[in-house]
Image (tube, coloured by chain):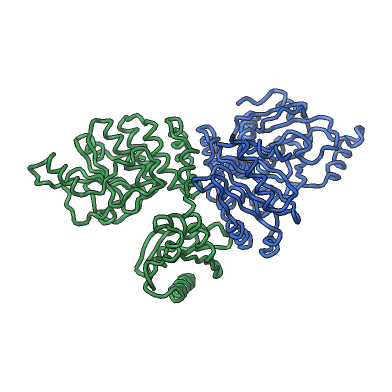
Chain colours: A blue, B green
Amino acid sequence: MKVPEDLLAFLHKGKQFFIATHISPDGDALGSSIALAMALESLGKKTIVYDKDSVPEFYKFLPGHERFTNSISSLKSSAEASEPARGGQISNLILVDCNDLERIGLENLKFISSAVIDHHETGREFGDIKWIEPQAPATGMMIFYLMKELGIKITEEIATNLYSAIAIDTGTFRYSNTTPEILRIAAELIEAGAAPYYIAENLYETWSENRFRLLLKVLNTLEINNDIAITKVTLDMFRETGTTVEDTENFPGFSRMLRSIKISALFREIEKDHYKVSLRSKGKINVAKIAESFDGGGHRNAAGYKIRSDFKAAKEALLKAIFTLKK
Amino acid sequence: MKVPEDLLAFLHKGKQFFIATHISPDGDALGSSIALAMALESLGKKTIVYDKDSVPEFYKFLPGHERFTNSISSLKSSAEASEPARGGQISNLILVDCNDLERIGLENLKFISSAVIDHHETGREFGDIKWIEPQAPATGMMIFYLMKELGIKITEEIATNLYSAIAIDTGTFRYSNTTPEILRIAAELIEAGAAPYYIAENLYETWSENRFRLLLKVLNTLEINNDIAITKVTLDMFRETGTTVEDTENFPGFSRMLRSIKISALFREIEKDHYKVSLRSKGKINVAKIAESFDGGGHRNAAGYKIRSDFKAAKEALLKAIFTLKK
């Protein structure tokens, strides 16, 4: 994996960087962004780290998570102070783990200069400098190589962020993107101070009792239709357990553990007769295609859409769409 | 990690080996035993691979699992044939992932010569040759080094067995025994043909619907007392879901995901007013001490015991024992 020369030049030249990552940030988005900020600061640069959404509670073990701001005005005033001649236009944007402004929720802002560091495939044009590596299991791996190239020491805090980023995006080395290369990088990150058990415990074993009770309620709704597992979460369930949407992170994946399942679908009630549907595939069926047929989108193995309908009809529409696709 | 010279000599000298592992075999026991058998066969040796219990259904993806026999008479007649002068006494026993005859359920047999390859700490004396590495995350890692030392090529089948052994005993690299060394070995095993996703899918995503329904019933019994999570499984639940004890593998660990929990306990009904209790600790409390107070045993983080009592009294006895230990 080769870090582009123009990206290195961009990072060497700038004095202040605006690092932004996608809405509903996951561990790779957060860990990669924080690690990049720490790395650039060790070179004497200033950084602002932005996410429109706040850091989910269970990611607050990541050292440096408090750097995240969701205030655009702080970006603007900082830009104003550093480059008054440009009238507060923002330069040196770095998009991390995403590749367009829409995904960061800043589609209406103008940026003077920008770079993209991402492992999601894209056909989009955004970014003066684009470093896209669809083969990389995690953006965290790209930040690792970037730091090597820049000759920056990986501190314990950076190692913890990068290890977490990689752990989340490989399902702690369970997904098909687990390669010898990523395991050797993980080994190096442990040597630099990352603690695998501490990270895994924080990622997987810090559920609130309420969240656990919500999961049980959801799993109790399980219906299996041939090779499709359907669960649902209702507004009543949130109310009864004192939980919110944030608590449903990973829920769509739970019924994957069933041998006979090819797709699992979680119907989340947004309001009466309005559902957000999250689809997960074990790889045999492309759920992005199904989501697209309902004007949604996503990846081959994880996709979603919204539908206005009662539950029964919404479920039948999904089963029909899957049946049509399979034919 | 240094393979003892006397073990290497023992393996070079023998022509036939009896490889045995512990009752209720897990992935490390199975994968390590099969890999060792394949390795010795590649040197032209004969092997018999023994477990008193049969291979659990969900480990049947391990290539070579069908080598396991639970017939002692086949051991004896094979010994008779190979060494008639010794009257059928068995030589060249290799205990894998355990270190005494009781753990393999053959405490009444006599062996002429024996070796032990294990990563469990022991004060016992069994074995003419003992190779015990309590620091090794898995016995599979020891077999890996043994093969290196013997100059044996790691085939795809062997790699799959060793990777599975390591995956199970490190919680696919989530437990505190996850080291840079074990990650680099895993990387090498992938290069030799192990497929991380295929293995993880088989280990974690091949639940029957009945087993899943049983898990739900069990989780629905969850009670939390301070930092202790208690669940139970009854004979009725097995009946209602068409499942058996084998299906409760991993169940004691599920409530670990709760942040506030230090210990999780699963009460399994053996018969009316008779329970097997499995304890899991997140590391702060030594559950072996608690199990010992009920004449059970185990490790710091995983232990168990049996108790004759109704559920309510059994539960109260446990809570009291934990409370006493904490003081």
Left or right position of B112 against B196? left
**Residue A47 picture quarter:** top right
Residue at image coords 53%, 41%: A173
Q: Quadrant of the N terminus of chain B?
A: top left
Left or right position of A20 against B60? right
Residue A222 percent location from the top left of the image: 58, 54
Query: Which is nearer the eye, A10 or B240?
Result: B240
Residue at image coords 65%, 31%: A146
Residue B241 percent location from the top left of the image: 46, 59
**Residue B74 picture quarter:** top left
Which residue is farthest top? Answer: A5
Left or right position of B254 against B23? right
Residue at image coords 42%, 57%: B243
Kindly tell me whether residue B286 is visible in this rendering: no
Q: Is residue B244 above or below residue B42?
A: below
Residue A254 percent location from the top left of the image: 57, 50
Which residue is farthest left? Answer: B85
Query: Which is nearer the eye, A300 or A201?
Result: A300
Q: Is residue A150 above or below residue B105?
A: above
Kindly tell me whether residue B288 is visible in this rendering: yes
Left or right position of A38 against B135? right
Q: How many numbered marks are there?
A: 0
Residue A5 percent location from the top left of the image: 69, 23
